[in-house]
Amino acid sequence: GENVGLHLPTLSVQEGDNSIINCAYSNSASDYFIWYKQESGKGPQFIIDIRSNMDKRQGQRVTVLLNKTVKHLSLQIAATQPGDSAVYFCAVPGGSNDYKLSFGAGTTVTVRA
Amino acid sequence: EADIYQTPRYLVIGTGKKITLECSQTMGHDKMYWYQQDPGMELHLIHYSYGVNSTEKGDLSSESTVSRIRTEHFPLTLESARPSHTSQYLCASKGHRETYNEQFFGPGTRLTVL
Protein backbone atom coordinates (compact mmCIF):
# COMPACT_ATOMS: atom_id res chain seq x y z
CA GLY A 1 0.00 0.00 0.00
CA GLU A 2 0.80 3.67 0.07
CA ASN A 3 3.75 4.61 2.29
CA VAL A 4 2.49 6.93 4.99
CA GLY A 5 4.50 8.09 7.96
CA LEU A 6 4.09 10.32 10.97
CA HIS A 7 6.92 12.36 12.41
CA LEU A 8 6.31 11.90 16.11
CA PRO A 9 4.61 8.97 17.84
CA THR A 10 3.65 11.01 20.90
CA LEU A 11 2.76 14.62 21.65
CA SER A 12 2.16 16.09 25.10
CA VAL A 13 0.45 19.47 25.08
CA GLN A 14 -0.78 21.85 27.74
CA GLU A 15 -4.52 22.41 27.81
CA GLY A 16 -5.32 25.55 25.87
CA ASP A 17 -2.22 25.40 23.69
CA ASN A 18 -2.24 24.58 20.00
CA SER A 19 -1.25 21.10 18.76
CA ILE A 20 0.42 20.27 15.48
CA ILE A 21 0.54 16.73 14.15
CA ASN A 22 2.52 15.93 11.02
CA CYS A 23 2.32 13.29 8.31
CA ALA A 24 4.42 12.48 5.26
CA TYR A 25 3.23 10.48 2.27
CA SER A 26 4.90 9.14 -0.85
CA ASN A 27 2.22 8.82 -3.56
CA SER A 28 1.77 12.05 -5.51
CA ALA A 29 -1.31 10.59 -7.26
CA SER A 30 -3.46 10.71 -4.13
CA ASP A 31 -6.33 13.10 -4.72
CA TYR A 32 -7.43 13.57 -1.11
CA PHE A 33 -6.11 13.11 2.40
CA ILE A 34 -7.95 12.36 5.63
CA TRP A 35 -7.31 12.82 9.32
CA TYR A 36 -8.88 10.44 11.82
CA LYS A 37 -9.10 10.56 15.60
CA GLN A 38 -9.23 7.34 17.62
CA GLU A 39 -10.14 7.43 21.28
CA SER A 40 -9.34 4.55 23.58
CA GLY A 41 -11.61 1.57 22.97
CA LYS A 42 -13.27 3.08 19.90
CA GLY A 43 -12.94 2.94 16.15
CA PRO A 44 -11.34 5.81 14.23
CA GLN A 45 -13.57 8.84 13.72
CA PHE A 46 -13.32 11.19 10.74
CA ILE A 47 -12.07 14.68 11.61
CA ILE A 48 -11.42 16.47 8.35
CA ASP A 49 -10.21 15.84 4.82
CA ILE A 50 -8.56 17.92 2.15
CA ARG A 51 -8.49 17.53 -1.61
CA SER A 52 -5.19 17.60 -3.45
CA ASN A 53 -6.10 20.85 -5.25
CA MET A 54 -6.22 22.68 -1.92
CA ASP A 55 -3.43 23.66 0.45
CA LYS A 56 -5.50 24.54 3.49
CA ARG A 57 -8.85 23.62 4.94
CA GLN A 58 -10.38 24.69 8.21
CA GLY A 59 -12.94 23.01 10.42
CA GLN A 60 -14.11 23.59 13.92
CA ARG A 61 -10.86 24.19 15.89
CA VAL A 62 -8.91 22.13 13.34
CA THR A 63 -6.92 23.14 10.29
CA VAL A 64 -5.26 20.83 7.81
CA LEU A 65 -2.37 22.06 5.70
CA LEU A 66 -1.16 20.25 2.60
CA ASN A 67 2.23 20.78 1.01
CA LYS A 68 2.32 18.70 -2.16
CA THR A 69 5.83 19.84 -3.04
CA VAL A 70 7.32 18.01 -0.07
CA LYS A 71 4.41 15.54 0.28
CA HIS A 72 3.56 16.61 3.76
CA LEU A 73 0.35 17.36 5.59
CA SER A 74 -0.35 18.56 9.07
CA LEU A 75 -3.27 18.79 11.45
CA GLN A 76 -3.46 21.77 13.74
CA ILE A 77 -5.77 21.73 16.74
CA ALA A 78 -6.47 25.11 18.30
CA ALA A 79 -6.93 25.54 22.04
CA THR A 80 -6.41 21.85 22.78
CA GLN A 81 -8.89 20.40 25.25
CA PRO A 82 -8.80 17.23 27.40
CA GLY A 83 -11.28 15.64 25.01
CA ASP A 84 -8.69 15.94 22.25
CA SER A 85 -6.55 13.27 23.94
CA ALA A 86 -6.49 10.42 21.43
CA VAL A 87 -4.44 8.80 18.69
CA TYR A 88 -4.49 10.73 15.40
CA PHE A 89 -3.95 9.07 12.04
CA CYS A 90 -3.51 10.47 8.58
CA ALA A 91 -4.94 8.30 5.81
CA VAL A 92 -4.12 8.42 2.13
CA PRO A 93 -5.75 6.62 -0.81
CA GLY A 94 -3.63 4.84 -3.37
CA GLY A 95 -4.73 7.13 -6.17
CA SER A 96 -7.72 8.20 -8.22
CA ASN A 97 -10.57 5.69 -8.00
CA ASP A 98 -8.63 3.70 -5.38
CA TYR A 99 -11.10 3.22 -2.55
CA LYS A 100 -8.54 1.74 -0.17
CA LEU A 101 -6.75 3.84 2.44
CA SER A 102 -3.24 3.53 3.83
CA PHE A 103 -2.84 4.73 7.40
CA GLY A 104 0.14 6.26 9.10
CA ALA A 105 1.42 4.91 12.41
CA GLY A 106 -0.53 7.40 14.55
CA THR A 107 0.43 10.16 16.97
CA THR A 108 -0.79 9.83 20.55
CA VAL A 109 -1.79 13.24 21.87
CA THR A 110 -1.93 13.66 25.63
CA VAL A 111 -3.41 16.88 27.01
CA ARG A 112 -2.02 18.09 30.35
CA ALA A 113 -4.40 19.94 32.64
CA GLU B 1 -22.58 8.79 14.42
CA ALA B 2 -21.96 6.08 11.82
CA ASP B 3 -24.42 3.19 11.65
CA ILE B 4 -21.90 0.40 11.57
CA TYR B 5 -21.86 -2.32 14.17
CA GLN B 6 -19.45 -5.01 15.27
CA THR B 7 -20.03 -7.98 17.53
CA PRO B 8 -18.68 -9.17 19.81
CA ARG B 9 -16.81 -6.17 21.19
CA TYR B 10 -14.48 -8.41 23.18
CA LEU B 11 -13.67 -12.09 22.69
CA VAL B 12 -11.32 -14.35 24.62
CA ILE B 13 -10.98 -17.78 23.10
CA GLY B 14 -8.72 -20.81 23.18
CA THR B 15 -6.33 -21.91 20.47
CA GLY B 16 -7.86 -23.95 17.68
CA LYS B 17 -11.39 -22.57 17.97
CA LYS B 18 -13.30 -21.31 14.96
CA ILE B 19 -14.59 -17.77 15.34
CA THR B 20 -16.65 -15.35 13.29
CA LEU B 21 -16.50 -11.61 13.84
CA GLU B 22 -19.66 -9.88 12.73
CA CYS B 23 -19.90 -6.53 10.97
CA SER B 24 -23.03 -4.90 9.66
CA GLN B 25 -23.96 -1.44 8.42
CA THR B 26 -27.33 0.12 7.76
CA MET B 27 -26.15 2.89 5.43
CA GLY B 28 -26.43 0.88 2.22
CA HIS B 29 -22.72 1.28 1.58
CA ASP B 30 -21.32 -0.86 -1.20
CA LYS B 31 -17.69 -0.85 0.00
CA MET B 32 -16.65 -2.59 3.21
CA TYR B 33 -13.27 -3.22 4.80
CA TRP B 34 -11.58 -5.19 7.58
CA TYR B 35 -8.49 -3.83 9.30
CA GLN B 36 -6.21 -5.35 11.91
CA GLN B 37 -4.72 -3.00 14.49
CA ASP B 38 -2.38 -3.55 17.42
CA PRO B 39 -2.93 -1.04 20.29
CA GLY B 40 -1.99 2.49 19.26
CA MET B 41 -0.49 1.28 16.01
CA GLU B 42 -1.44 1.83 12.39
CA LEU B 43 -4.33 0.06 10.73
CA HIS B 44 -3.52 -2.72 8.29
CA LEU B 45 -6.05 -3.64 5.62
CA ILE B 46 -6.68 -7.41 5.56
CA HIS B 47 -9.86 -7.72 3.44
CA TYR B 48 -12.17 -5.54 1.42
CA SER B 49 -15.29 -5.80 -0.68
CA TYR B 50 -16.75 -3.46 -3.27
CA GLY B 51 -20.10 -5.20 -3.45
CA VAL B 52 -22.08 -8.39 -3.00
CA ASN B 53 -20.12 -11.52 -3.94
CA SER B 54 -16.93 -9.46 -4.30
CA THR B 55 -14.07 -9.91 -1.82
CA GLU B 56 -10.36 -9.18 -2.06
CA LYS B 57 -7.35 -9.64 0.17
CA GLY B 58 -5.73 -6.53 1.55
CA ASP B 59 -2.13 -5.47 1.96
CA LEU B 60 -1.51 -7.51 5.12
CA SER B 61 -1.62 -11.26 4.73
CA SER B 62 -4.20 -12.83 6.98
CA GLU B 63 -5.36 -16.38 7.64
CA SER B 64 -8.91 -15.11 8.00
CA THR B 65 -11.60 -15.28 5.34
CA VAL B 66 -14.58 -13.06 4.58
CA SER B 67 -17.86 -13.27 2.73
CA ARG B 68 -20.25 -10.70 1.30
CA ILE B 69 -23.59 -12.33 0.64
CA ARG B 70 -25.62 -9.28 1.60
CA THR B 71 -24.76 -5.61 1.15
CA GLU B 72 -25.09 -4.82 4.83
CA HIS B 73 -23.14 -7.76 6.23
CA PHE B 74 -19.39 -8.53 6.02
CA PRO B 75 -18.37 -11.25 8.50
CA LEU B 76 -14.77 -12.31 9.09
CA THR B 77 -13.94 -15.91 10.00
CA LEU B 78 -10.90 -17.56 11.53
CA GLU B 79 -11.10 -21.34 11.08
CA SER B 80 -8.53 -22.09 13.78
CA ALA B 81 -7.56 -19.27 16.10
CA ARG B 82 -3.96 -18.92 17.28
CA PRO B 83 -2.28 -16.57 19.78
CA SER B 84 -0.74 -14.68 16.84
CA HIS B 85 -4.29 -13.64 15.87
CA THR B 86 -4.62 -11.64 19.08
CA SER B 87 -5.37 -8.09 17.95
CA GLN B 88 -8.11 -5.55 17.40
CA TYR B 89 -10.21 -5.99 14.28
CA LEU B 90 -11.93 -2.94 12.82
CA CYS B 91 -14.65 -2.98 10.21
CA ALA B 92 -15.36 0.04 7.99
CA SER B 93 -17.66 0.99 5.14
CA LYS B 94 -17.81 3.64 2.43
CA GLY B 95 -20.66 4.68 0.22
CA HIS B 96 -20.72 5.19 -3.52
CA ARG B 97 -21.46 8.89 -3.29
CA GLU B 98 -18.38 10.85 -4.20
CA THR B 99 -19.29 13.89 -2.14
CA TYR B 100 -17.38 12.52 0.79
CA ASN B 101 -14.21 10.50 0.99
CA GLU B 102 -14.08 8.94 4.39
CA GLN B 103 -14.61 5.40 5.54
CA PHE B 104 -16.89 4.98 8.54
CA PHE B 105 -15.59 2.70 11.26
CA GLY B 106 -17.27 0.37 13.70
CA PRO B 107 -16.17 0.20 17.35
CA GLY B 108 -13.91 -2.80 16.78
CA THR B 109 -13.60 -6.31 18.19
CA ARG B 110 -10.73 -6.94 20.56
CA LEU B 111 -9.71 -10.58 20.14
CA THR B 112 -7.50 -12.48 22.57
CA VAL B 113 -6.46 -16.03 21.75
CA LEU B 114 -5.02 -17.97 24.64
Image (cartoon, coloured by chain):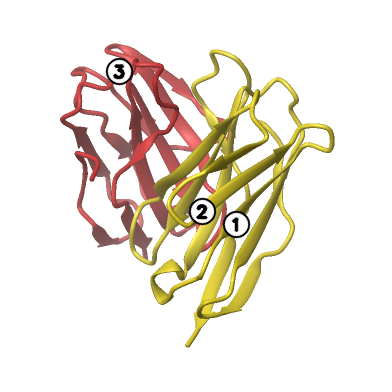
Q: Secondary structure at mark 1?
A: strand
Instruction: Answer with the quarter of the image where residue B74 lies.
Output: top left
Say left or right for A5 vs B80. right
Tag 2–tag 1 contact (CB < 8 Å): yes
Instruction: Please state the chain letter of the residue tagged with numbered disc 1 in the rendered image.
Output: A
Kindly indicate whether the residues beneath marks 1 and 3 are on one polypeptide chain.
Answer: no
Whether A87 is drawn above or below B76: the answer is below
Instruction: Answer with the quarter of the image where residue A29 lies.
Output: top right
Q: Looking at numbered disc 3 in the image, what kind of residue is underneath it? A: Asp
Chain A representation colour: yellow
Whether A81 is drawn above or below B69: the answer is below
Say left or right for A104 vs A84. right
Chain B representation colour: red
Marks 2/1: CA distance? 5 Å
* Residue receiving disc 3: B30
Mark number, residue A62 = 2
Marks 1/3: CA distance? 32 Å
Q: Nearer the viewer, residue A16 or A87?
A: A16
Say left or right for A79 vs A28. left
Say left or right for B16 vs B48. left
* Residue receiving disc 1: A76
Q: Is residue B39 visible?
A: no
Instruction: Please state the chain letter of the residue tagged with numbered disc 2 in the rendered image.
Output: A
Q: Nearer the viewer, residue A17 or A106?
A: A17
